Image: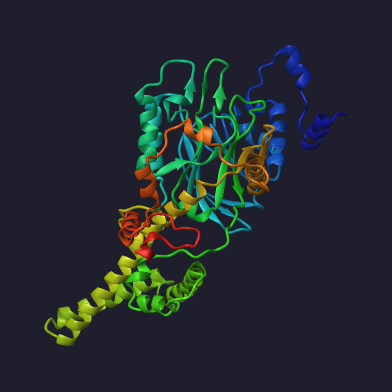
């Protein structure tokens, strides 16, 4: 008995491969025992705990039988009550996930999920869009109405819709109306595609290739999860490419100092800097500068811990105090002490808001910010999303082999640049005057001008031309500090 036969026997599935191949019997979807086994193998190999299946072709009275064979010990829901074909199944392993059904339509099943061991909660929607564009308009409207507030949300499945004109090869031309609805939905709900790896096109009928299967996430997803990607796998016995969402451990860089412009507004800022200034005179000025910057880092870190580490809490307290004084003044509008307190409380609250905005502008590298309790999470999510977008998880080495994992990527890059740059030379060959003379040369005046010492005006002009929001140097100090 071969391994496939043993697996079928274990699951209680009659193996009909020979009958199918010889008699050309049309067994469609999960009714075909081979597909049930294939799904079971897929779940085991990819360690899947939550699953969405579309267009299974299974009759409602056979659901329990087929489901118990394909994913034994799991729980499941479906939308047979809204469509006689039961177009969407959602199944989960109860030891890994707790799933609560929120909303169901003919075209999607919307759930709230909680990982049992990690206690991480998120919303997930499994989508199988109808074929006709007009039929899908109701899907986009219902999805917009299901949007959770300030919670992570993932929408995954077969949208039967494309996002870009490059998403389809073959068939008719891609028209604006083919991509308009999906783009408008993503803009209105602030959704974007999850980072993906694997084949680009997810469905084919051997004539047309298209990318109609996708995973979309909102901004809050980046706050709750460090690094996630969707892997487009080989389609095996299906005409669609399975999508597997992977939660990958991301590298945590060592915390390092970074200068914040908000510190400069603190009354003790200048005194903290002055206390670290070295004594004038002497040699080894670069060494003195290094010691000075080291001392300044320590002083500014202490300033941050004492005055800025709990900005959100300070903001809430300052606002409550200002509100309380303003309400008291409504009863005693001419109370001089209260008027002074109101002025002080208002100034204090404004200072905290300014510090928060300055910090967010530096982190997001944006000159505009609409600040408030409702949007602060969004901007921190944008910051984290920006950082994660620079991560490289898969890379091909010099032999063309795909290497995955942050450590593997680092090793490939180090190896590449070591070979590119070569070993450190022990001696250098002098420049050939003949080769230099082949190209344009500087005039005597230009050479003298290059050797001219920099003036304070030159240094100040160059330094003040750098925006404060630009990334700091390796020492952590931005142009804002030196200004």
User: From the image, which quarter does the N terminus lie in?
Assistant: top right
Q: Position of residue 379 (x, y in %)?
A: 39, 55
Q: Is residue 137 above or below residue 417?
A: above
Query: Residue at image x 39%, y 72%?
Result: 313
Residue drawn at 36 percent across, 57 percent down: 454
Of 289 and 192, the residue lying toward us = 289
Q: Quadrant of residue 442?
A: top left
Give above or below for 24 relative to 2: above
Task: Give residue 127's position: percent from left, percent from top.
Answer: 49, 36
Q: Please, is residue 279 above or below residue 390 in the view?
A: below
The answer to whether residue 97 is visible is yes
Q: Position of residue 211 (x, y in %)?
A: 51, 28
Q: Which picture quadrant has residue 353?
A: bottom left
Name the one closer to the observer, 326 or 312: 312
Snapshot quadrant of residue 275: bottom left
466 vs 198, nearest the viewer: 466
| Way the structure is coloured | rainbow
Q: Is residue 80 visible?
A: no
Residue 322: x and y in percent read: 26, 76
């Amino acid at each position: 008995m071969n391994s496939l036969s043993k697996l079928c026997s274990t699951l209680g599935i009659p193996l009909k491969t020979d009958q199918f191949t010889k008699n050309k019997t049309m067994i469609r979807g999960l009714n075909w025992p081979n597909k049930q086994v294939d799904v079971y193998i897929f779940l085991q190999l990819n360690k899947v705990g939550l699953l969405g299946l579309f267009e299974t072709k299974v009759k409602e009275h056979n659901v329990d039988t087929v489901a118990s064979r394909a994913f034994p010990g799991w729980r499941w829901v479906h939308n047979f009550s809204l469509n006689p074909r039961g177009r969407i199944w959602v199944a989960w392993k109860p030891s890994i996930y707790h799933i609560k059904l929120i909303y169901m339509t003919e075209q999607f099943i919307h759930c709230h999920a909680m990982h049992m061991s990690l206690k991480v909660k998120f919303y997930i929607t499994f989508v199988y869009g109808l074929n006709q564009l007009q039929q899908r308009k109701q899907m986009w409207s219902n999805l917009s109405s299901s949007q959770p507030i300030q919670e992570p949300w993932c929408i995954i499945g077969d949208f039967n819709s494309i996002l870009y004109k490059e998403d389809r090869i073959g068939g008719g031309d891609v028209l604006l109306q083919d991509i308009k609805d999906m783009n408008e939905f993503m803009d209105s709900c602030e959704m974007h595609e999850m980072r993906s790896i694997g084949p680009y096109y997810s469905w084919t009928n051997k004539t047309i290739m298209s990318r109609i299967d996708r995973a979309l996430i909102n901004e809050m997803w980046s706050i709750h999860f460090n690094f996630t990607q969707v892997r487009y796998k080989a389609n095996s016995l299906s005409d669609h490419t399975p999508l597997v969402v992977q939660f990958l451990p991301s590298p945590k860089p060592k915390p390092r100092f970074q200068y914040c412009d908000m510190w400069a507004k603190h009354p003790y800022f200048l005194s903290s800097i002055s206390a670290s200034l070295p004594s004038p005179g002497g040699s080894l000025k670069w060494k003195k500068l290094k010691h000075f910057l080291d001392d300044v880092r320590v002083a500014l870190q202490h300033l941050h811990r004492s005055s800025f580490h709990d900005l959100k809490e300070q903001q809430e307290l300052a606002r409550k105090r200002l509100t309380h004084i303003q309400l008291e003044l409504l009863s005693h509008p001419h109370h001089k002490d209260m008027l002074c307190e109101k002025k002080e409380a208002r100034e204090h609250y404004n200072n905290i808001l300014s510090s928060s905005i300055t910090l967010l502008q530096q982190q997001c590298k944006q000159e505009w910010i609409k600040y408030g309790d409702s949007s602060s999470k969004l901007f921190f999510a944008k910051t984290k999303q920006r950082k994660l977008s620079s991560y490289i998880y898969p890379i091909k080495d010099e032999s063309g082999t795909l290497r995955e994992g942050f450590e593997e990527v680092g090793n490939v890059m180090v190896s590449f640049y070591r070979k590119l740059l070569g070993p450190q030379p022990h001696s250098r060959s002098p420049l050939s005057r003949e080769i230099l003379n082949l190209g344009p040369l500087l005039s005597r005046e230009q050479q003298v001008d290059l050797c001219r010492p920099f003036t304070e005006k030159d240094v100040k002009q160059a330094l003040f031309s750098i925006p404060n929001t630009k990334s700091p140097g390796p020492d952590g100090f931005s142009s804002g500090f030196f200004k």
